Image (spheres, rainbow, N blue to C red):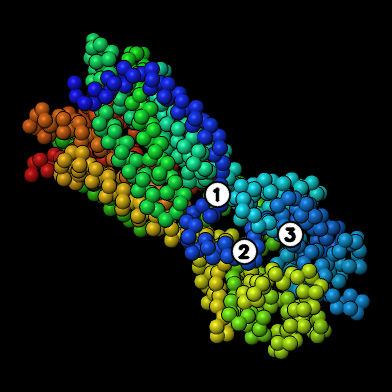
Amino acid sequence: MNRAEAWVEWVIRARRWLLLFVAMITGLSVFGAAGVGVDNAVEIWFLDDDPSLIAYNDFLETFGNDEVVVIGVHSKEGTLIEPSGLRRIDAVGDAALGVSGIARVRSIVTEPLVRDVDGALVVAPLIDDGPIETSQVAEAQKALQSDALVGSMISEDGRTAIVLAEMESMDNIDTARDGILADVQTAVQAVETEATFAGIGVVYAALNQAATQGAAVVISASYVLIMALLWALFRRWRAVLLILSVVGLGAIWLLGLYGATGHDINMVTMVMPTLVLVIGVSDCVHMLVHVADQPAELPPMERVKRGIGKVLWPCLFNTLTTAMGFLALATASMPVIRDLGVFCALGLVAAFVASLILCSIFALHPTVLPVFRKEGLLQRGIDLMARLAVHRPVPVLIVAGFVCLGSMMGITRIVVDTYSIDFLYPDHEVRIDSDRIEEEFGPYTPLEFVVSHPDGVKDPEILASISSWQDKMEMEEDVGWTRSLADVVMGLDRVMGQRPVGSIPENPEALEQLLFLFEADSDANLARFLDSTETQARVTVGVPMASAKTFGQTIERLTDHAVLPDGATIQPAGYIPLHVRIMDHIISSQLSSFTWAFIVIFTLIGLLFRSFRMAVLAIPANLMPVLFTLGCMGLLGIRLDVATVTIAAIVLGLVVDDTTQFLYRYRAVLAETSDIVKAVQETVTSVGRPMAVTTVVLAGGFSVLGLADIKSVAYFGCLLAISLVAAFFCDLLVIPALLVVTARR
């Protein structure tokens, strides 16, 4: 009896204590899993000491929360600049302001306008608490046009206005956001008007909802599909239920640990339970198939010992190599990718432990063992691949070379980018609302800049340069509006000077007088444009919702338009630059995780077989599925984004499993015969069946991720399924062909 069989025997003899241990761990895990929430905020992608995140938090501390709910108020009949329309806008604003968590509401009826009322110059909102009279409409139209709020608060045709509900600054904004948004939508929908909702926070909430619902749907669908596939392949319900129980325990233990350590799922980590469910099936299948292959006349314990003992070490090694593939993600610069790698690795180890315990115990009962047809379509296909690899190795390798060449051409077309709203399908309500607001109103997404000067920015020359910069930006096709302290000054100067166009006073004393008037009559609204030290001025630009790459190009283009006095600087600020920074993390995470996965996995293969040659032979068959998967991404136009960034390292960790099973079996067969060709053919014939079963089940399980409500997660699952099918053919064609060719030489 070898050491592997001794371990299996110990598990069987200690089965009562081990089953009690499994029950206790499962109970604790259920309790921990109950505390798992959902969080898709942008901060989860950055380390606490990341300079971009620090700059973002500094901006929030200086100017307040930049997260706003954009509420579109629409009119099909005519302009909203009339009594009933203005009342509707006012009612929507009041409804949103009444929600706990909303700090302030801005709209055309609340923005302070510079107005001449009965000969007196005032800075006041268009509408106070009193009723809206028809006589106010003409004044409103004049004031709105002169104060440049048309285009920034209401569309040019007056049919669409936006109400900006600014959220309070709070430490728990990520957990409170969904509830606040739901309350805002409920309150606004109670107003009898047609309203739509958009904004970064609204996208986050939609992603949270999609992650929650998607995870439940995907896990359930995975279970159902795996059950159907296992039944079709095994023809034993008890075998199917045993496998599903084992992998289910692994997923529960994973979620329990994840929740107990205070983590929340997001659009990336939502795939963890499915990954563990699907990958964990492989060990169970190999164990049960090899037990079923043992002579039926053997005593049950002996049959289990021999069967599981034969695959225990390769299964353990597969678990370790796949876990190392995931642990390579711990080198990523994004915390959420690190979490995915670490917890998936732990989940796979947990699934292996559950497989060893439960399969060893319950495989004692013959009714849980699979039943195979010795001669069938599956086996005939495997035999055909064995003949191709042995008798036509050169054509096989030539075809493989062309596939690699085509894949590399596809890789050159991969786009590295991430687009938050595009994670949702086009028919999602949030995307429909966002598109409508942009179509009827114009660009609404706020892009923030901060102009700084150590001596202060309340300077005529600096404000004049900001105003000139705004004029240049507004000439850009994708800029809808701009807003800054310069607009306030020019509006005051226009009214005080009774001129159609305002300007920035050249006299500093005159500038101070204008700003004093504004602060006195508008409840210190300068805090929106100027920091407390008066050394930083905020400039906000309305741009279309776009991807990180497009945002980055927009920032660079708009910044180039600025010509500021000596000592003044411009810095992009707020959410969008943080979003742009993600692209750098995507590239570095992909490179670091794949590099480490490659080094560690093939080093482990060399150590397992104590053969450098084995490790080298394994490289082509395992790199090909990675190249093929990335090539498909490029050819199909699938972006390398925050959801698909882990694809290369994970694919490498997955596809090496069958390679290990093949090489482990090949070495054992080769030890019995000196004929390499014969050993190759016998290995393909013997291990092909369980490899085909695991490939079908794993590919089917991963393809279920295609049902996810988040597009990139759906792509991620389908790409994994494609990679596993490619790996199956590489393991049963490319590796055998390489072995035969090298043997002949």
Q: Are the residues at dot 2 and dot 3 in contact (C-beta closer than 8 Å)?
A: no
Amino acid, disc 1: Asn
Q: Nearer the viewer, residue 171 or 611?
A: 171
Counting residues from the start of the chain, the first of labels 2 and 3 encountered is 2
Q: Are the residues at dot 1 and dot 2 in contact (C-beta closer than 8 Å)?
A: no
| Quadrant housing the N terminus | top left
Q: Residue at x 74, y 62 (%)?
A: 106
Q: Between marks 2 and 3, how big is the CA–CA gap?
A: 16 Å
Question: Mark 2 — residue?
Answer: 61
Q: Residue furthest front?
A: 17
Q: Between marks 1 and 2, how big is the CA–CA gap?
A: 21 Å
Question: Mark 1 — residue?
Answer: 40
Crowding at dot 2, Cα within 10 Å, few <14 / some 14-19 / many 20+, comes out as few
To which quarter of the image does residue 16 belong? top left
Crowding at dot 1, Cα within 10 Å, few <14 / some 14-19 / many 20+, comes out as many
Q: Nearer the viewer, residue 99 or 225?
A: 99
Counting residues from the start of the chain, the first of labels 1 and 2 encountered is 1
Relative side of 682 to 270, left or right: left
| Quadrant housing the C terminus | top left
